[in-house]
Image (spheres, rainbow, N blue to C red):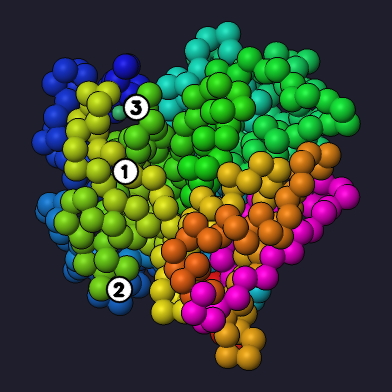
Amino acid sequence: MEITPLHNWISGKIGVTANTLNREVLESYQLGKLRQTVELARSRSIFYRRAPAGPASFAVSSLADLQRLPFTTPEDIRQNPLHFLCVSQDQVNRVVTLQSSGTTGEPKRLYFTGEDQELTVDFFHIGMSTLVSPGDTVLILLPGEVPGSVGDLLVKGLQRMGVRGIPYGLVRDPAHTLQVMAEERVNSLVGIPTQVLSLARHRGEGEKQLPLPLKSVLLSTDYVPRAIVRELERAWGCRVYNHYGMTEMGLGGGVECQALAGYHLREADLYFEIIDPATGEPLPEGEEGEIVFTTLTRRGMPILRYRTGDKARFIPDPCPCGTLLKRMDRVKSRVTGSIQVAGGVLTLAELDEALFPLDSLLNFSASITCENGIDVLHINARPAQGAGRVTTEMILTALETIPLLKSAQMQGKMKVAPLIQVQDDNSRVNAAKRVLIDLRKPEGTR
Ligand SMILES: [Zn+2]
């Protein structure tokens, strides 16, 4: 097994050889970058200059001192994104507007300079070298039309290693995407789990599944259902890697190595913490909590201690690939992604693992209502066209594998209401984060 390419890359960025990289050297580099970032934010950003604790709280003489700094929340950025800007507006190369998943929220804006974007391209170049090699062709099933968009930066990163990246965009018609894959001799895909699943499960009229010589797939989103990974491996016989990132991180956060056992992180550009979401205190290594990150090298809009809302843990054991870079376990849920039902906690991840093994299921949405004093779980399932059938009985049976749902139903504390929703057209593609919606609360929060 090859060591993650991030190891050599980060060594180079720090200015040491791969053999001499150790945690001490890395952390001392991180501290230096952190101090520069804090100084930049404190002196140039209106938001950090006005932080309630005052500039004195921004004295950082060790990485542990970072814990004294206040958190930055998505709401902070949403309220006044320009207050985070540390460069003049003419130095901003790219503005990303993220629509709020809520009904009333303002969109969130993020600003990147050319240098900031270069950091992302560089990470994409190195990170992708885990799964593709010169001469390969990658179809990118992510937005890519706009300069500086994720697809555009990925194409640039791949070019640097002699790999052809084709920015395709989201899958709206799986048959068309599969045709492009065959014509362009695509042997690797990057996409969102349910979108890539729609390709693996597509069956045209009287068609068998297209034989595709795929070598690798990279799935990128907050949570990658294991059931989808297994299905892609089975359908295509390829390796399925996970990437973790969000726009706020500069798109890239971390990527799995060939061990496929947790992401290695961009530790020269980002500093990660795992905190207790209730108290905000850092958690001991290995415990699961909320992911918080601080940018170390961004100039346009540095962000200190950003609360991602995603939950994961650091894996304390060394990675089989041999690096000393940290490993973060796969993100399993959102802080707000679990819902109290019938005396227990239900997560979308549990529903994903129970339902995605169903052969012809493409996607589903889930919500909870309260009817006559009983919680009702609504599952709105979308089957693959022309494939076998998904029935409400199959959904009910699959959900019985979740102990909480089984016992709550038996005790009459809860009901499950599945609905099969056949869509005639594939134009309604939603790439937003999937959430378990709680409709029992008046404001309909998730
Ligand atoms: Zn590794």
Residue ID for mark 2 = 278
Q: What element carries label 1?
A: strand
Q: Can residue 444 be seen in this view?
A: no
Q: Specify whether residue 123 is painted magenta.
A: no
Marked residue nearer the N-terminal end (1 or 2)? 2
Classify 10 Å Cα crowding around label 3: few (below 14), some (14-19), many (20 and above).
some
Which quadrant is home to the N terminus?
A: top left
Residue ID for mark 1 = 328
Question: Mark 2 CB in 8 Å range of ligand 1?
Answer: no
Question: Mark 3 CB in 8 Å range of ligand 1?
Answer: yes
Vertically, is 405 above or below 314?
Answer: below
Residue stretch in magenta: 410-438
Residue ID for mark 3 = 259
Vertically, is 233 above or below 215?
Answer: below
Marked residue nearer the N-terminal end (3 or 2)? 3
Give me the C-alpha separation between circle 1 and circle 2: 21 Å
441 left or right, relative to 268: right
* Residue sitting nearer the eye, 75 or 411: 411
Residue at horizontal 44 percent and vertical 47 percent from the top: 249
